[in-house]
Amino acid sequence: ASVFGSWVALRVCNAGLRGAGWAYLAAVGVNCAILVLAMSVLPPSAATRRIKWYARAETAEAAAAGGGFGGAGWLASARSYLTQSGNMMVRSLMLQGAVFSLYVVTSRELGTEALSAHQIIVQLWGITSFVCDGFADAGTMLGSKHVGEGHPHAVRGLSRTLLGLGFVVALAVVAALAAAEAPIQHLFSHDPEVLDLLQQNWGLLIGMQPVNAAVFVTDGVLIAFGPPAFRYIRNLMLFGACFVFAPAVAIAVTQFHTLVSLWAAKNLLTAWRCGCALWFIETVRTVARAPDAGPPPSPDQPAETSPLLA
């Protein structure tokens, strides 16, 4: 919806960057409306019964433990929730701040044509996410099941399978962008300067698709590890934004002064995120268990095989 809206705003309505911004806002609104509608009218009856049963059991447990609203148990849960939400909020602020800063620097340093080309690249840069976000959701759901059962090592196999699927999607996108380079560029603009800038950045756009796919997939897999991963995600984004992305942008502005160099800085941050996520997934050995999770499984007890690994 975002890509289509940008195309309509720039080519059909000739509304410029302001129109592209409104198109993006409309796309987000449509996606939110569809999500709310789906959650309201389409939940499976079995899932609904399960959720209701779990809620009743949780309430009974809280009452028996002296918890409830305002109790010690409630305060501990609220504190934990706010802490983990804060970790992910820092991550999101750093990531969105990096994206926003590119818009600011491009508009101030490179001009309108570069900003137009930048907007088009933004739409195409995340094209693998349309499919890979689904793989990320699968990684979160199935991975958290393995972690909850005390088998965090099983998430590695799941991650490799999802990364393989993401890589296939990335190759398909790479092939499409390479084969239809000129037609895709002319879909968004006929301005010679914009087209020249797109041409300069096209190789970088194509080359980063496999890394983008890996980042989209591992974002979901990381979340499966719970609070330890939330802290790790916060720290890697803080370090990446401050000590990888910001210096790279400064060098791009002062030494190169090109859109390619700015996008190289953006992709350097993406590569940092990818490497850190893969390192965590491949090296984690244990994850702290909740107090009510029961005894840990025996070392000889095999992890239940995920449907994606069967």
Image (tube, rainbow, N blue to C red):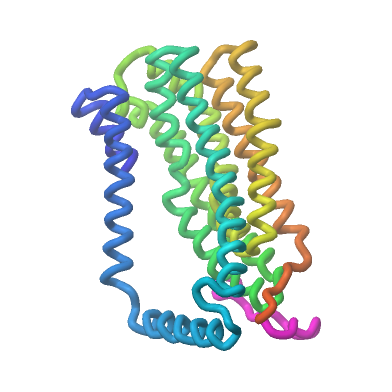
- Whether residue 141 is situated above or below residue 275 in the rendered picture: below
- Residue 309 counted in the magenta span: yes
Percent x, y of residue 30: 27, 49
**The C terminus - image quarter:** bottom right
Residue in front for this viewpoint, 238 or 284: 238
Percent x, y of residue 246: 64, 26
In the displayed structure, does residue 86 sit left or right of residue 50?
right
Q: Residue at x 55, y 32 (%)?
A: 98
Percent x, y of residue 260: 54, 21
Q: Residue furthest left?
A: 13
Residue in front for this viewpoint, 165 or 278: 278
The overriding secondary structure of the stretch rendered in magenta is: loop
Q: Residue at x 58, y 47 (%)?
A: 215
- Whether residue 170 is situated above or below residue 97 in the rendered picture: below
Res 247 → quadrant: top right
**The N terminus - image quarter:** top left
Q: Residue at x 34, y 78 (%)?
A: 44
Magenta part of the protein: which range? 293-310
Percent x, y of residue 309: 60, 71
- Residue 150 counted in the magenta span: no
Q: Residue at x 67, y 37 (%)?
A: 240
- Whether residue 7 is situated above or below residue 113 in the rendered picture: below
Residue 164 in view: no
Residue in front for this viewpoint, 287 or 8: 287
In the displayed structure, does residue 133 sit left or right of residue 190?
right
Residue 291 in view: yes
